[in-house]
Structure formats: structure tokens, C-alpha cells
Amino acid sequence: MKKSMTITEIAKEAGVSKSTVSRVLNNKTDVLPDTKERVLRVIRAHQFQPNAYARSMSQRRSRTIGVVVPHDIDYVFQNQYYMEIQRGVLKALTKRGYYALILCCRDMKKAFDAVLQKRVDGLLVISPLYEHTPQINELLENHVPLVLVGKAPASQKVYQVCVDNYVGASAAMRHLFELGHERIAYINGPHFLPSSEERRRAYLDAMARQGYPVLPGMVQEGYNSIDSGYQTASRIMDAFPDVTAIFVASDYMAIGVMDAIHDRGLDIPGDISVVGFDNIQMSEQVTPALTTVCQQIEEKGRVSVNLLLDLIEEVETPEKPVVELEAKLLARASTGPVSVKTAKKC
Amino acid sequence: MKKSMTITEIAKEAGVSKSTVSRVLNNKTDVLPDTKERVLRVIRAHQFQPNAYARSMSQRRSRTIGVVVPHDIDYVFQNQYYMEIQRGVLKALTKRGYYALILCCRDMKKAFDAVLQKRVDGLLVISPLYEHTPQINELLENHVPLVLVGKAPASQKVYQVCVDNYVGASAAMRHLFELGHERIAYINGPHFLPSSEERRRAYLDAMARQGYPVLPGMVQEGYNSIDSGYQTASRIMDAFPDVTAIFVASDYMAIGVMDAIHDRGLDIPGDISVVGFDNIQMSEQVTPALTTVCQQIEEKGRVSVNLLLDLIEEVETPEKPVVELEAKLLARASTGPVSVKTAKKC
DNA sequence: CTGAAAGCGCTTACAG
DNA sequence: CTGAAAGCGCTTACAG
């Protein structure tokens, strides 16, 4: 640390020009080994590190990316999904020597500011909603390097990393069918979330394929909170006392569903089986452990960072803009065969 | 957005000098209203925002602070405590127009890099351990604006925002005494965490004051994870079948303790009462809801940010460097009176 | 292989 | 009230 050094003082002390110090700092080839060693010695002696912002200015890039989470901060910093995404993102970013600026606001204003002020080289947008389509399009028109994480709302040719919701939800339904369930209710995520529609479609298609009836009220919409899962499940159990399984579009809601079932003195999976979606950490900790569809959350963060940095560094333009990760079913303890007792009722 | 503008182009288009544009941008007083309006019109027309890093260079401050979390990233981004701290920090930072750089690494190397590269104007260190004392001292010697969040390991006169662990833990013990408990076990946090010692002392003092025996093995150390709470509680219940209450130094461990109790077919609080510490969000969601000591996590983040920014902006030097927030007991459903059945055993 | 000069986009005294 | 100049700490052609 010592007193704050600059490249000029290092140059003077090493008896070379600033240019040479800069070359050493940036590991350029054409520097005489002797010179290089002499400069390095001075640098080390003073624990010198070049001013990052001066560097950004002349290099015209900041090695910083904006991690945009277009939702309310209270919601985001309480939701394990975002934590795990951030973990994957931060790890990958660190590995490639980049910094992150968390830009958390519903209307994406802070994202635009960061771009206009040249704070960031590119943007990662986590779970955009339909309502963010105009903003995303504006960024694209301005050629801001951009990768969406999660199902994209836009139909654009924008880079995005997501999970195959349809395949994942279908696997969940197949699992329930194999256990003998026919009376299966579904709790969807918010309609303004692009992934919800795909999961709902998978549920409906699966039920139709089996020829099982989907009565009005057997499909409900929740708001991704534990509490909302609780409320919605209660409504379903009131209306359909004979459901033997509930497929839920998110783990948080599924945990609320489990609470509601337990509060009625029913057993999971003895009386009702529950399947979630996401595989957040909590899904393994609840009792019984929740059967769920794995979103590969951390992996999604990792992949999208590498895609974005390749875009920024122009390493190569990936052929197709959509990376679709596999969504696999994780069968745990919250699902089981239809019990004799329950089956009789049907 | 349009093409990337600079202050020079704005100046030309408005028919003034760069100096004047700069004055308008920074809301300096002495600019003729007419001139100001003319400049503003051009700025708005181009959605111009000045380059943040150029600004940082000449102003010699970045309006960015480093949020240092000296622990492993996998641990941090999975722990609600850190999420809630981050929430309070981000909110307060945003309100005062600052940006945050998350610097997450055990040895604090990234924090030093950020300081040397002048990326940040100051540092917030979240939950430092004893082992970080040398690093903290080095930062202080170099006059880096610094605020520690959580009990400080150093004896220095360093600014810190923490909760009164002793008072909080004492309140928890008093609560158990009032419910008639005498046979109370204690699970401490890791010894390398400065707060652990205070909580342990409060437990021991309280037991001694009441004259209740603390047998060897009734005080154990866990590692702040759900699993570690589970393991430790099991050991305690094996050795002391007659404990009627367990006081646990963190909510995560307390949740594991609850699992362990339930897995033995025992009731909470019917057979054993459990008290946690922290009041993370999950503590309210488990069944039964956990009685715990509230850390005011988000508030801690808010207060420390404002302290740090005051330090940086030299608004005023707060009189005493240690801000100690109140730690209040939140009595919920996991504690109850000693049952007749159990009491007899004693 | 190395240095002098220009430039990155701002702000800040200094004149006037 | 406004402008010209210097400076913030780097990097990047351009010479040599």
C-alpha cells in the first residue's frame, strides 16, 4: 500500500519510461527480461497496482458487468433462487477476472444508467418478465452485449440461457403417472413470468394425453411465495378433496403446499404427493424432502457469464442464441404411490 | 443512448465550453439560467450521462464501496444472514447514490486489490473472524475508511456495528427460566467467530446465577449449519435425556436441533424447548415457529452503510466507534413451560 | 526493445 | 457568469 503510487513514479524509480512499465503491467512480449525484472522489483516493493478506472478509460472497457435483477430488492434478497444464481455468476466472473455490479430495480433504470455511464461492458438480465421486453429491445438496438438468464419474454434473437421447462414439467407428470396418480392438481407461477406458460402447457398436455380430466379450479395461479402456496393448496383441497397429487410450479410454493397439507392432518406422500420445481436448497431440507425438477441454477449462472464474456471479448459468436439446459426430475420423499385408501375414493 | 456522446460534443452542440457543461452536470450554482436550460436540453435530447470512470479519476473518488465478505462464496450465498445484510446494505447505498462491489473471499485479498486499484472509496467488512485481525489492522494503518459489521475481532478503535450478544443471550436464558427450565443445554457457534464467546458467557453466567448445574457435555460447539445442529443435538440428547430446553447460538443450527428432536418422536415445546439466535427469515417459517433473539440484520446493514459513507464524506466523526444495536427476544412457538411429565424426571 | 506524445472523458483552479 | 488550460493515471500507436 504505502503512499499511493502511480505508474510515473514506478517508472522513475525503475529508470524507464511509463510506456515500459505499462508493458510490464500488461504482460506484453517485447520487453527485455532484465528490464522487466527491474520494473517488477519496484512494483512489488510498493505493492503497486494500477488505477483500475484510469485503465478502463484508456482501454475503453471496464472488466465489470452489470448483473440486472429487474425485481424488487426485498423480494430478491430473500429468495434462494436469486442467491444461487448470484453464486454461479460471481464464481464464473471471478474466474475470468471480472467484477460485478448488482443492478437491482424493477424498471431496469439502474441498468440503463450503468450502460450510459460506461460502468459496465455488458449486461446479464436475471429472470426478465414480459413487461421488460421494451427495455430489452432498446438495449439490443444499442448493441449492448446482453444475455438473458431464464426464459426470455422477447421473441428476439437475443442470447439466453434457460432450462427446458416443458421437458422438466413433463418429467414431473410422468413420475406422478407412474405412481398411479390421476387426480392431479396444478399450481402455476405468476402469469407475468415467461416460464409459467410452458410449465402449464406441459401439465395440460400430459393430463390430456392420459385422458385424465382437468376440472375447472384444478389449475390455479400462485405468486411464488410460501404463503401463496399455502393459500392456493387450501383452496384446491377444499374444492377437490380427492386429489392425490399436486404439481407446483416452484419450490417455494410447494413448501407452502406441504404446510397446508400437514395442517389438515394429512400425510405426505401417504395422502397427497407433492412435486415442486427449481430445486432450491430448502427443498432438500424440508420434511419430507421435496421431489422437484432441477433447474441447475448455479450452472445457469455459470454458463450465462461465460456466454456474455465471450460476446464481450468477441471470442466467438455462439451459433444459436438459446442455450437450453436439461431440467431433470429429482425424486425424493414427497411423492409416493397412490394409497389403497385414497385410490378407492377415485 | 444514441451514439456515445461526450461532454465535448454536448458543449459544441449547446454552444458553450466543456467547463459549463460540467458545471450544469454537477449542479454548480454560478450558471446563467438561460445557459443552463440550453445545456440541459441538449443533454436530455441525447440521454447523455457522463462517463463514470472519467469522473472518478478527476474527482478522486468512485462513489463505490467494497462489501467484503471474508468467507467462502459457497457458504455465503446460501446463508440467509448474509442475504439480509446485503439487502440492508444495498438499499442504504442506493439511497445515497453509491454502488457496491461484492468482494467475497476468505483471505480478503480481493478487498486489498480493490483498494490498491482505487476501485472503492471505503470498505464494509461483514462478520470478520479473529483470523482477519492482521488484514484489518493493515487497512487501518493505511487509513482506508472502514466499518466492521458484527462483533469485531480486534481491540482497535475501529468503527463497528453490532448487536449486544450478551444482553440478547441473557434475555433468552431469562425466558427459559421463566418457563421453569433448569436443565438447559447450550450449543455454541464456531469458536473462531467473535460473537460466540459473548453468547457462551451469557449462558454460563445465567446458569450460575440461578445455581443450575452445567455438566460437562452440556455445552457443545457447532458450525452454524443445519446439519451441524442436528448432529450436536443428537449427541446432547443421548448424553442428557433429561434436558428440557436447548439454547442454540444460531437459527440455522436451531433448525437442525428441531429436526433432531422431531426425528426422535419428541414434541417441541412439549418435551424440549428450543431457542435460536439471529432471527433469519426461515426461523418464522419452520414448524413450530422458532423462538429466537433478533439480530436486526437488515438494520445493521443500513446503519453501517450510513456510518461508512459519513466517514468517507467526512460529514462528521461519530463520537464512539462502536454502535451496539439492541438484541431483543422474540418468543414464538418453540418454547413453552416445562411439562409435568418432564419436570417430574428432574 | 524503448521512449515521447497524444488521447481516454471528465473536473478544477485560474483568469477575465 | 464563462472559457482555456492543466491534470487525473493509464494505454496506444508511432518513431527510432
Image (cartoon, coloured by chain):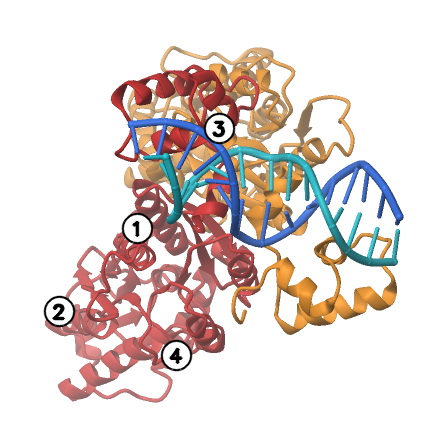
Chain colours: A orange, B red, C cyan, D blue
Q: For residue B290, what is the image quadrant? A: bottom left
* Residues at discs 1 and 2 in contact (Cβ within 8 Å): no
Q: Do labels 1 and 3 share a chain?
A: yes
Numbered label attached to residue B179: 2
- Residue B7: image tag: 3
Q: Decide which of tag 4 and tag 1 comes sooner along the chain.
A: 4
Q: Mark 4 points at which residue?
A: B220
Report the quarter where the C terminus of chain A lies: top left
Query: What residue is at 52 percent from the left and 19 percent from the top?
Result: A136
Report in which chain the residue with disc 1 lies.
B
Residue at left 40%, top 55%?
Answer: B82
Three-letter code for the amino acid on which mark 2 is drawn: Leu
User: Tag 4's secondary structure?
Assistant: strand
* For residue B196, above or below residue A257: below
> Both on one chain, marks 4 and 3?
yes
Which three-letter amino acid code belongs to the residue tagged 4?
Gln
Q: Which of marks 4 and 1 is in front?
A: 4
Separation of marks 2 and 4 at Cα, in angstroms: 23 Å
Separation of marks 4 and 3 at Cα, in angstroms: 64 Å
Q: How far apart, in angstroms, are the residues tagged by discs 4 and 1?
A: 24 Å
Which one is earlier in the sequence, the residue at label 2 or at label 3?
3
Co-location on one chain, circles 2 and 4: yes
Looking at the image, is mark 4 or mark 3 nearer the viewer? 3
Which of the numbered marks, if any, corresponds to residue B287?
1
Q: In the image, residue B75 lies at what x, y percent?
A: 51, 58
Q: How far apart are marks 1 and 3 (CA)?
A: 60 Å
Q: Is residue B330 left or right of residue A167?
A: left
